[in-house]
Image (cartoon, rainbow, N blue to C red):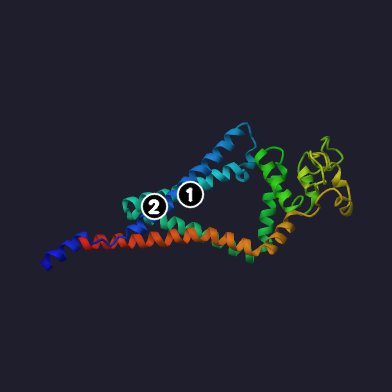
Amino acid sequence: MDRKLNLNRAETFSFINPWIRYFLFFFSFLFWVFSLLIVAIGVYAKVQKATDTVRDTFLIDPAVILIVVGVVMFFITFCGCIGALRENIRLLKTFSFSLTLVFLTQLAIAILGFFYSDQTRDALGKFVKKAIVHYRDDLDLQNLMDYIQKEFKCCGWNNYTDWSWNVYFNCTHGNPSTERCAVPFSCCTPVPGEAVINTMCGFGVQTQKYLEATKSIYPVGCADRAVMWIESHLLLVGALALGLALPQIAGIVLSQILISQIQNEISSVL
């Protein structure tokens, strides 16, 4: 009787913990759905501006960035979903390796950005310069720059005269543009009680001295403002970094545990 009971227990026993398996599945499925949403938003944004022919903005196009991030997330989370559901070791190893690679890449960028702050600032400056140059060529880029300048209360990268990089705002005497020597309205300080935004509030500002310009715009560059914002919101920055890292670490740990359990299960059968 005892021997029969032991045999029944051996038949029903499994090394694979169903809680870990299904938690990893739903965890991956949630981010898989999120990745589809990101890709859909990116594709929709790209289709809406299908007439855009500026190739130089491709790498800084917010729509393209969304599509790339979404596709990478889709591939990784798909491996996690199917790997956990089907107990497929190869897919789980692909999921774990990809997630580890992404995590280590983010960690390396953060460390290099901290220790090589000047080089990081220069690299970001090139990105922003390209965004300023193509400000009128890409609507998504324009909205992104306007949002950054409004939120950080800044203008340009180093200061407000950076807008001369743009052909429309260029302050040279030979520029026939009606916006010559101007800055976008997102640089302007809000006027109390103003119901309608004055989009011409930045006209002619580049010809003004710094102290005079402060009366109508935010003359400080976004580079300095970003540093000031990070220094004054270290707790928030830390929380965001932790919130980004924890799901990745959890996915790596859970997938490795499940891989080990599946291997033990296979070994017990052989």
Q: Residue furthest bottom?
A: 2
Q: Quadrant of the C terminus?
A: bottom left
Name the residue nearer the viewer: 260 or 51: 260
| Residue 111 horizontal/vertical position (percent) | 59, 65
Residue occupying the point 71% across, 48% down: 129
266 left or right, relative to 172: left
The label number, if any, that marks residue 25 in the structure image: 2
Going from N to C along the chain, the mark reached first, 2 or 1, is 2
| Above/below status of 241 relative to 82 | below
> Badge 2 local density, few (<14 within 10 Å), some, or many (20+)?
many
Given contact means CB atoms under 8 Å apart, are the residues at marks 2 and 1 in contact?
no
Image quarter of residue 164: top right
The amino acid sitting under disc 1 is Met
Q: Residue furthest top?
A: 51
User: Element under label 1?
Assistant: helix
Name the residue nearer the viewer: 161 or 36: 36
| Residue 102 horizontal/vertical position (percent) | 50, 56
